[in-house]
Image: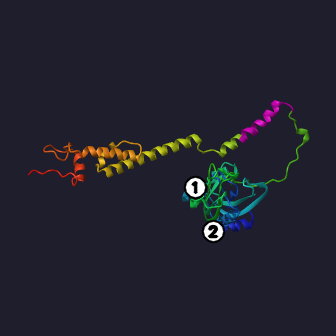
Amino acid sequence: MDKNTLDKINALTRRKFKAEELYTFPVVLCHNDIDRDFERFTDDALDQMAALFVGKTFISDHNPTAENQAARIYDTEVITDPDTETKWGGAYRYLKGYAYMVRTDSNADLITEIDAGIKKEVSISCSAAHRICSVCGKDMRDGVCGHVPGREYDGKFCHAVLDGITDAYELSFVAVPAQVGAGVTAKHYTPEKEEKNMEDFTPITTKEALDAAAAPLIEAAVMAKAAEFEGWVSAEDHQKALDELNAAHKSELLRCYRSKAALLAGLPEELADRLTGDTEEALCKDAQKLAGFTKSAATPHFEAGGGEMDEVEKAFYERNKNLYPRKENA
C-alpha cells in the first residue's frame, strides 16, 4: 500500500493506521448501461456519484444498521472502456471505488470470502432528481409520459435515464445486483501473457473430444444466464398475483357500493350485506326494492299494536322514525 492510499484512508479515520492493519479492495459501484430494472445512469450522474460516494459505508443487503457496516469507500474514479459499447449505443463507462476495512478477528472470514470471489456482487443506494424517458425525453415521475420501460416504441427501447444525483447513501453486498457487472474486481492484474508450448498442444479431431471440451463452457454460460434472472417473477406468478389483487379490489368495491346503496335507500347498515348485485346500479335497485318492502303499509314493524321489535327493526326505526312515526296509545 503506497503512502497516497494510506493518507486517503487516514483522512477518514480518528487515528493514523498502519498499512499492515488495513485491508483494501476495488469494486465497480455502477455503470452507464441499461440494467435489469430498465434504468441507466448518465455520464454526468457517474461523475456526480464519484464525489458523493467517497466516505460512504459498505454494508450487506441494504440493511442500514451499525452492526452491518463492513467497510468504507476511500476513493473513486470514473473509467471509460473504449472497447465496449452500451446497449443504447454509447461508450461504456463505470464508477470504480476503492474500499478499506481494519483487519480484525471478526472480519477475517469476510476478507477470505472477498478474496475467494464469494462476496462479490454489489448494489448502490442513491437519490436521483430526474428519471427521464429515453423515448420522449419527459420525466417519468410527472405521470404524463405514458411509456413503459422495457417496451419498444417505433424501434426505440424504452428505459429510464437517471440524472441529477442529489445524494449517495451506501453500497451493499447483494446476491443479485440490478446492474450486471457491479461488484468486487480483481485485486491484481497480470497483463503478461504466457506463451503456450505448441508441443503440449493436442488438436481436437473427434466429435466426442469437441463435446467434452465444449461441455464446461456451455454449462458455465447457462449458469451465468440463470443467475441474471434469479429471483425474477414468472409471467404465470405475476398474472396470478394480479388476478388475486383485482379480486380483492372488486370485493372491497362491492362492499362500499352495498353500504352506499343501503344509505341512499334509507336501510339500516345491518341490511347492507343482504343486498345482491355485481354493479353499483344493481345494488341500488335491490336496495330500493328492499326498502319498498319495509315501507309497505302492510308491514307492521312500526305500526304494531303489541309485541317487541327485534334489533334490526329497532335500528331501522330509530333511523327512519321521522318518516314512519310510531303510533302512541291515546
Q: Which residues are magenta?
A: 205-221
As drawn, is 218 to the left or to the right of 233?
A: right
Viewer-proximal residue, 267 or 163?
Answer: 267
Q: Secondary structure at mark 2?
A: loop
Q: Which mark is residue 8?
A: none
**Amino acid residing under circle 1:** His
**Residue located farthest toward the right when viewing the structure as drawn:** 199
* Residue occupying the point 72% across, 63% down: 77
Q: Find disc 2 in the rendering and name its residue.
A: 15
Q: Return the x and y of residue 25 as percentages of the image width and height.
A: 70, 57
Q: Return the x and y of residue 203 as percentages of the image width and height.
A: 87, 35
What is the magenta segment's predominant secondary structure?
helix
As drawn, is 130 to the left or to the right of 19?
A: left
Q: Which label sits in the foreground, 2 or 1?
A: 1
As drawn, is 212 to the left or to the right of 161?
A: right
Residue 213 found in image quarter: top right
Q: Find disc 1 in the rendering and name its residue.
A: 62
Viewer-proximal residue, 190 or 294?
Answer: 294
Residue 120 seen in the current view: no
Q: Return the x and y of residue 263 as percentages of the image width and height.
A: 32, 51
Residue 200 seen in the current view: yes
* Residue occupying the point 36% across, 47% down: 284
Q: Secondary structure at mark 1?
A: loop
Q: Is residue 212 magenta?
A: yes
Viewer-proximal residue, 314 or 183?
Answer: 314
* Residue occupying the point 55% across, 42% down: 239
Q: Is residue 176 magenta?
A: no
Tell me if mark 2 has few (under 14), some (14-19) or many (20+) residues whose alpha carbon lies within 10 angstroms of its own.
few
**Amino acid residing under circle 2:** Arg
* Above/below status of 147 relative to 309: below
**Mark 2 vs mark 1, CA separation in Å:** 28 Å
